[in-house]
Each structure stands twice: as structure tokens, then as C-alpha cells.
């Protein structure tokens, strides 16, 4: 949405010269972030007064980015609607309509923040243009190139700097460890307080040597961003523990959550599938372990529902045929919203079987718990502590189709155990894992940063 007619003319971003190859673009971003020194303690704007005491209104922005693909959607601040709301700019490489855990996390947190009086979310992302009815401003920046699934563009720092000025940002919340956008946003932040949210327990992925080479280089480059951050939030304790030795008291946890309405959805009906699997079917997501679950289903007579899509789907379909179980495996494709939850509730279990600890806090785990679908998980990374065996789910040995098949049989043979797991897990979500809980913690952490106090630590 363009600014008011009385505002100064918008300034478009510089045009790209030519798209660089993916690896070259990656190198540009790594150089951009690796050789910028960590800032000395900058001048901070005075903190806002307490919520009960009015703050002076701010003047409206005078410009915004308006290139064809960087035009924001959603309600924009104008001269008639200026207020004293504190603005949080979320910088995320992925955002709906793209699907995935980071996308859901950021959209849910921003939506919950929008309902908190005195706070205003703005999103900066690289995802394709989405619906025009976003409930808050969403800037979708173009990317010159992609390396694996990672968008990259050296123009982002200047573009994001303009957005931060136009939106009068009070906080910048960057979501990583995807290289590129989070680093560019941190570089552009100036005096705006930066909160880094870290979504992965490991950067290196199985079977991707080129990506892993860049990831290892990026692990050095991202130290600028982490040193610059006023607060670092892991999405699980497992992630946060990686940063506490180096960054100490500014490290905290802001766990994943689900929308409260998921808990209110009706539960019941037939459950024709013995198990469901929910993930993107991309080569970069092979570590999710569908190649372990399909052989497990060969040892189990039940049916499997696979929710998700991607370039690796045909390979998994071929594996199902090779194993002789194609008739018992349904590939449902990408599902979202109510359709996804209906599909999930048609299964008697959800299987999470990662082969590496990349998943910091699987969204699918909470969605299954909230839907009263028992979870069978491999004891890898954070899942080993998030799932209590026999209480909120069942744990299986990693990289073992035999172990997965054994836990499926155990669940089927013990309906009382399945019922107890469903109820225990649902109550856990209700008491701890909704976005109403999480946004209150988020505001508390932002307020601590704003007042220059010690970050709140769990």
C-alpha cells in the first residue's frame, strides 16, 4: 500500500546489475557479514515509559520501498493512524504462503503480537508474494540467487535500512540460521535493538556437501550477528545450550507453540491410518527420515499417510513401490489449515523420525499433541527430552526401521496407553504451549532489552 499523498516520494531500491551464480552470491553475503566488526556499544534511544504512562506520538514515515516485488502488503501506518505502538520488525527468510516450521512460527508470533495492546508487527521476508489481506505490513524482497534452498542478495542491507526507518522500528527480531537475510538485517539495524531467534540445532545436513561447506563457513560469519545481538533466543533449551558458553546471560528460550483454536477443534471420527508423516519432501529435508519410516511400514500391516510435497516425492513413491507397500501409502501433498489437521486426526499416530538434530522444536510435534494424536519419535536431538517415553509419546532408537515398527506395534496393542498419551500431551499443550503463553514471554524479553536490563533467562 503506498504512503499518503502528502508524504515524500518513495525511493525505489537500486536495480540489480545481473544475477550472480548461487555460490558467488553466497560468497558476497559471507564477505558482507564476516568482515564487519562487532559494534561498540551504540547510543540507545531512551526507553518508552511504562505502559500506563502515555508516550509522545511519532511522526509518520516519509517513504517506503516500492519496487514491484518489495511492495508491502497489509495495513500501513499513515498520518491519520500514527500512535505510540512499539514496532517490532520480524526478518525471516521464509513466510507464508510458503510452508514450514519457521514460516508458521513467525506468522503465529507476529499475529499474536498484533493482539497485544501497544505493539505492532511488521514482517520482512524473501518469500513469494502472498495474499493481499495480510493483517500487518509484509515486505517481500527479491533475491538475486538461491544456494540450495537459501535466498541471497547483497542489496538487502540498504533495502532493510529503509524499511526500518520507514516503519520507525523499535526492535528487530531476526530468524536464522538460514544465511543471508538475518545477517543483512542485523547489518542494517543501526541503533535498533536486535533479538536473534535461532531455529536449528545443527547447520550441517545429511548428504549435502556443497551446502555443508557453505554452512561451516557461515558458522564463522554469523558470529558478527550473534555478538551484535542484544538477546539470543533458542526455540528450545537444546538450541539455547549451544550459545550459553559463549554468550552467557543474553541467551534465553522462546519455545514453539500452537494457536489456541487448534485445541478447540473437534476430535473424533475414524482413524484409518496407522501412522502419519508430516514434512517437506525436499532433498534438503531428507534428514526428516521418511526413508526410515517406509521400511518400518513394511514390517507393519497398517496404512501410512504422508502429508507434504516437494522435489523428492517421486523418489519416496518409488521406494514405496520397491518395498511393495505402495498400496498402503497415501501421498496427500501439501495441506494447510483445517485440511492439514483433519488429515492429521485421521491417523492413530504421528511419526517423527529425524536422523540428525536439525529440528530444534518440530511444529508437527505440537500439532499432533494438540490434535490428540500420539507421537512416536526417534530419540535424536531435542526430541529425546521433549517427548517423555510412555507419558507424552513413545521414543524409538534412531536410524532403525525395526525400532519404529516395534513402537507402532506397541501403540496398537495398548489402547489404554494410547489414550493416556493423547490426554497427557494435549493437557501439556494447553498449559504451556499456546501462542498466548509465548507472546507474553516475548514482550517480557523485549521490554527487558528496551530498558537495558539483563535479558530474562529461563
Image (tube, rainbow, N blue to C red):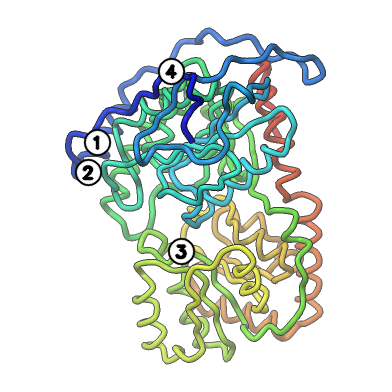
Q: Compared with residue 187, is residue 452 higher up or lower down, i.e. above or below?
A: above
Q: Residues within 10 Å of mark 1 (few under 14, many from 20)?
A: some
Q: Please state which of the two labelled residues, at mark 1 or mark 3, is closer to the viewer.
A: 3
Q: Considering only order in the chain, which callout, 4 or 1, is on the residue closer to the N terminus?
A: 4
Q: In the visual, does 224 lie left or right of 344?
A: left
- The mark found on residue 8 in the picture is 4
Q: What residue would you read off at disc 3? A: 280
Real-space Cα distance between discs 4 and 3? 44 Å
Residue 407, horizontal then vertical, whole percent: 63, 77
Residue 161, horizontal then vertical, whole percent: 42, 23
- The mark found on residue 23 in the picture is 2
Q: Please state which of the two labelled residues, at mark 1 or mark 4, is closer to the viewer.
A: 4
Which quadrant, please, contains the C terminus? top right
Q: What residue would you read off at disc 1? A: 27
Q: Considering only order in the chain, which callout, 3 or 1, is on the residue closer to the N terminus?
A: 1
The answer to the question of whether label 2 and label 1 lie on touching residues, with beta carbons closer than 8 A, is: yes
Q: Considering only order in the chain, which callout, 4 or 2, is on the residue closer to the N terminus?
A: 4
Marks counted in the figure total 4
Q: Residue at x 73, y 64 (%)?
A: 392
Real-space Cα distance between discs 1 and 3? 27 Å
Q: Residue at x 43, y 48 (%)?
A: 129
Which secondary structure, mark 3?
loop
Q: Please state which of the two labelled residues, at mark 4 or mark 3, is closer to the viewer.
A: 4
Residue 207, horizontal then vertical, whole percent: 32, 60
Q: Residues within 10 Å of mark 2 (few under 14, many from 20)?
A: some
Amino acid at each position: 500500500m503506498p504512503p499518503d499523498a502528502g508524504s515524500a516520494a518513495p525511493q525505489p531500491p537500486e536495480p540489480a546489475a545481473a544475477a550472480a551464480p548461487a555460490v558467488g552470491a553466497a560468497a558476497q553475503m559471507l564477505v558482507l557479514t564476516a568482515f564487519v566488526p562487532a559494534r561498540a556499544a551504540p547510543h540507545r534511544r531512551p526507553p518508552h515509559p511504562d505502559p500506563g504512562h502515555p508516550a509522545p506520538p511519532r511522526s509518520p514515515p516519509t517513504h517506503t520501498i516500492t519496487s514491484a516485488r518489495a511492495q508491502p502488503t497489509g495495513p500501513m501506518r499513515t498520518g491519520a493512524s500514527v500512535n505510540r505502538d512499539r514496532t517490532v520488525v520480524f526478518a525471516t527468510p521464509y513466510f507464508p504462503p510458503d510452508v514450514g516450521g519457521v514460516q508458521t512460527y513467525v506468522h503465529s508470533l507476529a499475529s499474536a503480537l498484533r493482539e497485544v495492546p501497544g505493539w505492532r508487527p511488521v514482517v520482512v521476508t524473501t518469500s513469494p508474494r502472498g495474499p493481499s489481506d495480510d493483517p500487518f505490513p509484509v515486505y517481500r524482497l527479491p533475491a538475486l540467487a538461491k544456494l540450495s534452498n537459501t535466498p541471497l542478495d547483497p542489496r538487502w542491507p540498504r533495502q532493510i535500512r529503509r524499511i526500518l526507518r520507514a516503519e520507525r522500528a523499535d526492535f528487530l527480531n531476526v530468524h536464522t540460521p538460514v544465511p543471508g537475510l538475518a545477517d543483512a538485517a542485523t547489518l542494517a539495524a543501526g541503533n535498533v535493538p536486535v533479538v536473534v531467534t535461532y531455529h536449528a540445532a545443527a547447520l550441517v545436513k545429511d548428504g549435502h556437501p556443497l551446502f555443508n561447506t557453505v554452512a561451516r563457513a557461515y558458522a564463522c560469519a554469523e558470529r558478527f550477528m550473534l555478538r551484535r545481538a542484544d538477546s539470543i533466543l533458542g526455540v528450545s533449551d537444546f538450541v539455547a545450550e549451544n550459545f550459553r558458553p559463549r554468550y552467557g546471560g543474553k541467551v534465553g528460550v522462546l519455545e514453539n507453540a500452537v494457536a489456541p483454536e487448534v485445541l478447540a477443534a473437534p476430535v473424533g471420527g475414524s482413524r484409518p491410518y496407522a501412522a502419519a508423516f508430516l514434512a517437506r519432501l525436499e532433498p534438503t529435508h531428507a534428514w526428516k527420515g521418511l526413508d526410515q519410516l517406509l521400511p518400518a511400514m513394511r514390517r507393519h500391516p497398517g496404512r501410512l499417510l504422508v502429508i507434504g510435497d516437494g522435489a523428492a516425492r517421486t523418489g519416496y513413491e518409488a521406494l514405496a513401490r520397491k518395498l511393495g507397500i505402495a498400496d498402503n501409502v497415501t501421498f496427500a501433498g501439501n495441506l494447510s489449515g483445517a485440511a492439514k489437521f483433519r488429515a492429521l486426526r485421521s491417523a492413530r499416530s504421528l511419526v517423527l523420525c529425524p536422523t540428525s538434530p536439525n529440528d530444534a522444536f518440530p511444529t508437527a510435534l505440537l500439532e499432533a499433541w494438540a490434535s490428540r494424536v500420539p507421537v512416536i519419535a526417534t530419540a535424536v536431538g531435542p526430541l529425546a527430552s521433549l517427548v517423555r517415553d510412555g507419558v507424552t509419546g513413545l521414543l524409538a532408537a534412531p536410524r532403525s526401521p525395526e525400532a519404529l515398527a516395534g513402537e507402532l506395534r506397541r501403540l496398537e496393542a495398548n489402547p489404554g496407553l494410547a489414550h493416556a498419551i493423547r490426554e497427557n500431551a494435549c493437557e501439556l499443550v494447553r498449559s504451556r504451549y499456546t501462542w498466548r503463553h509465548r507472546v507474553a514471554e516475548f514482550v517480557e524479553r523485549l521490554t527487558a532489552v528496551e530498558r537495558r536490563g539483563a535479558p530474562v533467562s529461563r
